[in-house]
Image (spheres, grey):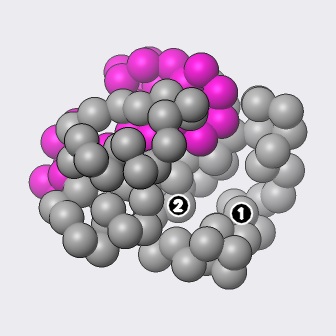
Amino acid sequence: MQKIYETSNIVPMALPTNEFGAQEPGDDIEISQYYENKFGVTFPVLKKTNLEHVIFATYGQPTWNFNKYLFDRRHDFVAKFDSNIPVSEVIKNV
């Protein structure tokens, strides 16, 4: 996702939730630092939320953690990819 952010007009956004197997147990700062330190993420990491968030209500509920919601730099919705779709496939479709 970082490559998409660096090489296109698309802005991936991390919207952490701990509702899938407790995979996001930290607070907002811990999660953001983890993404940055482990994966080199510089795209936006939003506040940890729950499945009632307006993004999910508007653009589709995630099927599991790590669904991908892509927006362009004007904030227009581009696409949603389920967690089982590898980033390499997302890149091909951007």
Q: Residue at 56% across / 33% down in the picture?
A: 83
Q: What is the three-letter code of the residue carrying label 2?
A: Val
Q: Is residue 46 visible?
A: yes
The numbered disc on residue 31 is: 1
Write the start and end of the magenta stretch as one range: 54-77
Q: Nearer the viewer, residue 88 or 21?
A: 88
Horizontal side, residue 18 vs residue 86: left or right: right
Horizontal side, residue 19 vs residue 6: left or right: right
Q: Are marks 1 and 2 in contact (CB under 8 Å)?
A: yes
Q: Position of residue 15 (x, y in %)?
A: 55, 46
Q: Nearer the viewer, residue 38 or 31?
A: 38
**At numbered mark 1, what does the secondary structure look like: helix, strand or loop?**
helix
The numbered disc on residue 78 is: none
**At numbered mark 2, what does the secondary structure look like: helix, strand or loop?**
loop
Q: Residue at 65% across / 27% down in the picture?
A: 64
* In the image, residue 78 lies in the stretch drawn in magenta: no
Q: Marks 1/2: CA distance?
A: 8 Å
Q: Position of residue 14 (x, y in %)?
A: 52, 52
Horizontal side, residue 24 vs residue 83: left or right: right
